[in-house]
Amino acid sequence: MNHFVFYSLIFLFNSFFIFNYLINNLFKDIKFIEIIILEAILFLFYTFFLLLFRKFLFKTNQIKKWDYLIVIFIVIFSFNFAYYNFKDYKYKLYETLKNRLIEGYFEFEISKVKSNYVLLKIIKSFDNKYNYLLDTKVIISRSEIEKIINNNFLIENAKIFTFACLEFVDKYNQKLNFYFSNNIFYKVNYFYDFSFKDNNNLLNDVRKFINKRYQDFKEHSDLIKGMVWGIDDFSYYEKQKLIQSGLYHMFVASGGNISLVFNFSFYLLYFIYYVFLYIFKKEIHNLVNKNIILIIFSTIIVFVYCLIVGFDYPLLRAFLISIITNLILFNYNRKNDIYFFIKLLFILLIIFFVIDYKFIYSLSFKMSFVSFMGIAILASRLKNLILSIKFIDKIPNFLKFLIYYLVDSLVMSVSAAIFLLPILIYYFGFISISGIFYNIFTSFVYPIVFYLGITYLVFNSEFIYNIIYNLLSFINYLVNREQWILYF
């Protein structure tokens, strides 16, 4: 069967449309005939595209009757899958509506720390009638919780034991995607009898050290923490400035960071490998499998980075996708087979979708998906186009290593940015024209700040500090100047 990508699209987007209809009618009595009509419309829609694919994309592969039967099967299966999960979520929400105000003892875990809010995951309820809330999250203003914990440092995975008053989020429908994808039902009214347990371990000590060291950059400390580690300490005003400049994606830990870490580990080990090869001649070449060593070494480095940042969903997806795709592509000569790469990506996305269906409502899920699609389709072509320029052949060999690295970083950033444009227009309602040009410049600056920012944690060098500070000043200037924006 040669239409895996098409069938994957049917599964993902049919489930999304069904979810969207069910969730938007959550407080209404949904009629079965309405869902059947929706299914019929979607089936005709997909059948129409199947015919288009037959005419324009799959000329050598005639579509048979089995293909239409498979389409019918996937449409039905995706509907049942969506509806089953919807019933589970509807049960939780209806239980919540019966208890719009809850008071009792809970144990929370700090799940996510943002500039203006903190998400706490309920890990234990001391009243059995609230057990349906286990593993769901509550939201609280960051300023409020910082007052309660006094001088304690807010760190993810820290535990809180307290008597809490929780109130149902009454503006649920206005921010449905956010609350649904994060599994949020309640906000915190107040805490009482509060006990904060900061996990004093090596990992948290490293996070505190990073925050303390980056305070050296004063007014730019938020920029470097966001660029290197994805720490969101921006105010609402600063965040809007970053979005309007088209550079906000650089300050969120996701696929871009994983790509840079993976890229760095790849080139670092290659350099070490050839140094040993030069010293020991062919002995080491015969003893080790280069690809396996590359994958293991890169996986360890990326895992350590993710461990420090925290395995949030966007980073977890990017980590798994990067590791699995590189594991396959290193061992099979399919690097130029775009269709194979996209099929692999769809397999991974379906796995994530089955694990947690709420992914489809998450903006980060959509952006990660589209970014990797952009890299899969455009990156290799852009790289070959740039490397085909004649003057590159005349560059000394010791500089080509650096050129190849910069080209890799550039094409990944540009490819992802191009594919992200439609999503950014849909969610934010505008295109930052100036941001298109800024991304070209910052695609060179970003890797430098990223790597030097990590280096500065180890080597407190004034030279490194000055480079980082000047580059951050340049980015800050771009962000705060008047932007060219096209509204829709």
Image (cartoon, helix red, strand yellow):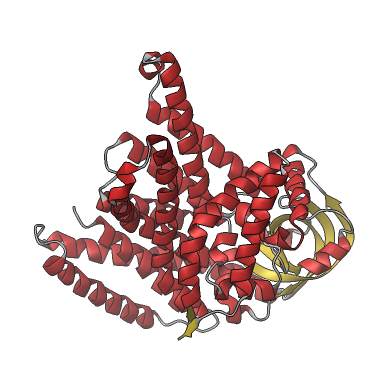
Whether residue 161 is visible, yes or no, is yes
Q: Position of residue 471 (x, y in %)?
A: 62, 58
Whether residue 25 is visible, yes or no, is no
**Is 281 situated left or right of 44 in this image?**
right
Q: Position of residue 370 (x, y in %)?
A: 41, 63
Give whichever of 426, 480 is nearer the camera: 480
**Is 440 situated left or right of 140 in this image?**
left
Give whichever of 425, 408 is nearer the camera: 408
Label count reads 0
Give whichever of 122, 388 is nearer the camera: 388
Give whichever of 214, 75 is nearer the camera: 214
Vertically, is 126 above or below 462? Answer: below
Vertically, is 475 above or below 453? Answer: below
Measuring 33% from the left and 46% from the top, which residue is drawn there?
392
Measuring 60% from the left and 43% from the top, which residue is drawn there?
305
Q: Position of residue 449 (x, y in %)?
A: 60, 52
Measuring 33% from the left and 52% from the top, which residue is drawn there?
383
**Is 94 situated left or right of 189 in this image?**
left
Residue at the outermost bottom position:
488
Location of the C terminus (image quadrant): bottom left
Vertically, is 202 above or below 110? Answer: above
Measuring 49% from the left and 62% from the top, which residue is drawn there?
441
